[in-house]
Amino acid sequence: MIKPYEKKAFRVNLITDFYTDVLGIDLQEVAKFVDIDKNQANERLSRDVLEYKKQLGIYDEKVNQLLVKYCGTLDRVLDYAYFSMAEREKFMEQYREQNEKVAINYLQRSSDRLFDDMDYNLAPYQGLGMETVYEITRWLIHNLE
């Protein structure tokens, strides 16, 4: 099954569409899962926290849970580009021919654009600053149980 991974392509949302389209579960049955414990949701970490974990080699489950809580204290998790605009254009050009085939042959699109809702205006991630390292570390120390 080939389907674009973009919000406007979902009938309901990614998870519900997966249950109904891929697993073949009836939509009414899926609705029963909606109120399952939302505390078990996969929380999104900020780019700084991901970099913090990577640089320090953090794999401890307790610390990971604390970092999820830390991200919950942030106003919002910002999106960053992993490539500069020039790097993105170079990458997309490298796969232009294959993307065009997928877009036209499988997604019935008239162009080589696989994703209509990509944000090309994202600022590139500038790296983890020391002040942010101190802030995250102070928060972890104050919240250790």
Image (spheres, rainbow, N blue to C red):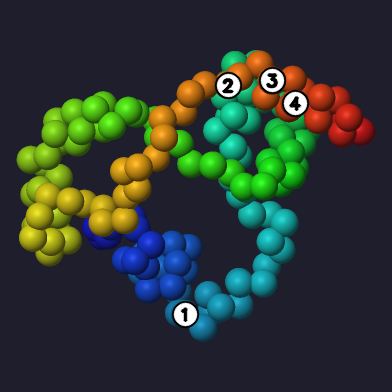
The residue to which callout 4 is attached is 135
Tag count: 4
Mark 2 or mark 1: which is in front? 2
- From the image, tell me which residue sits under label 2: 128
Side of 131 relative to 78 (left or right) = right
Local SS, label 3: helix
Q: Are marks 4 and 3 in contact (CB under 8 Å)?
A: yes
- Depth check: give the residue in front, 117 or 40: 117
Q: Are marks 2 and 1 in contact (CB under 8 Å)?
A: no
Q: In percent of the image, x 31 and y 43: which residue is there? A: 120
What is the three-letter code of the residue carrying label 2?
Leu
Task: Determine the secondary structure under disc 1.
Answer: helix
Sequence-earlier tag: 2 or 1 = 1
Q: CA distance from mark 1 to mark 3?
A: 48 Å
Q: CA distance from mark 3 to mark 2?
A: 9 Å
| N-terminal label among 1 and 3 | 1
- Residue most toward the right? 145
**Crowding near pointer 4: few (<14 within 10 Å), some, many (20+)?**
few
